Amino acid sequence: MYNNAKFDLSFSLNNRIRKFINNIELTSEQKIKIQKSHQYLRKHNLDKLDYVSNSFLTGSYKKSTLINHLNNDVDMFVVLNGYDQYNVKPNTILDKLKKDLQSKYTTTEIKQNKPCIVLNFNHITFELTPVIKIDNSLALALGFDNTPDFYMPNLSSNNEWVKIDNPRTLEKQLSTANKEFDNQLIPLIKMMKKCKIHNNISNIQSFEIEKLAIDNLYYINNYRNGIEQLLRIYGWTHKNYTQEEIGNFTDIDFSKFCRNSLFGNDFPMVKS
């Protein structure tokens, strides 16, 4: 179906896609800065607060699906100590956490953006979400899954806690699926996140891109096949081409489509 006749074989479609993946990866310098920042934040500030039990990374950074983008953020759960979902209100904790962080980071922009506290460093933004952890000790005693439940501040204005899925569940699912797909799934998800940003798609969240891929992909022949499948899964269409027409593109036309429509200038240019 994919005709490579027009290609210089030294730079095939797969090579272009691999180059594109490399272009949207975090740089080594970015990774080092983020690692140092979150380790210092947790060890020297969060974990020393008497109302904090522990903290852990979550979101795209933890799942290795974060891409190189100007508005990147790193998500972190701040697990509370001595509270349950009934004896404290979210706004009380958010206000307290913000005040304590402001006393440590006096020159850093810190704001409350429910359900989290946002620390805006020059190189990265951290979003700290306070959560209440509920251990399923009864489930463990009965031999069932004892994955703990978490409660986080409700996004609505009623100042209550809301139960959420344990983020580590999705992390494990993604890691398992990526191995089953020969380590091609995480790079594909990164590419589709870039597509979302490039095309200003706002009706799907980052974790939904991951979850839909895990739940609906059953095979990946190659990166092009994966891109085409995910476009269908997400329901992302193009005003000028049907999905069938995209599937019938030659590899060189698909490369042009990737650069001009899907991903932008991070995808290598096709020279005529």
Image: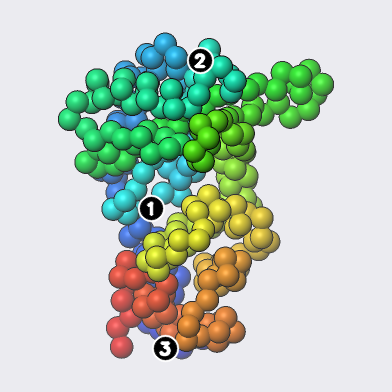
Q: From this viewpoint, is residue 56 visible?
A: no
Q: Residues within 10 Å of mark 1 (few under 14, many from 20)?
A: many
Place residue 145 in its image quadrant.
Answer: top right
Choose mark 1 or mark 3, whichever is in front.
Answer: 1
Q: Quote the CA–CA distance across marks 2 and 3.
A: 63 Å
* First in residue order: circle 1 vs circle 3: 3
Q: Is residue 26 above or below residue 139?
A: below
Q: Secondary structure at mark 2?
A: loop
Q: Quote the CA–CA distance across marks 1 and 3.
A: 31 Å
* First in residue order: circle 2 vs circle 1: 1
Q: Secondary structure at mark 3?
A: loop
Quadrant of the drawing holding the N terminus: bottom right
Colour scheme shown: rainbow
Q: Nearer the viewer, residue 252 or 64?
A: 64
Residue where numbered disc 3 is placed: 6
Q: Amino acid at mark 3?
A: Lys
Q: Is residue 72 above or below residue 162?
A: below
Residue where numbered disc 1 is placed: 67
The picture places residue 142, in percent across and down from the top left corner, at: 82, 21
Q: Residue at x 42, y 88 (%)?
A: 6
Choose mark 2 or mark 3, whichever is in front.
Answer: 2
* First in residue order: circle 2 vs circle 3: 3
Q: Residue at x 48, y 83 (%)?
A: 239
Q: Amino acid at mark 1?
A: Ile
Residue where numbered disc 2 is placed: 81
CB of mark 2 within 8 Å of CB of mark 1? no
Q: Nearer the viewer, residue 179 or 50?
A: 50
Residue 190's label in the rendered image is none
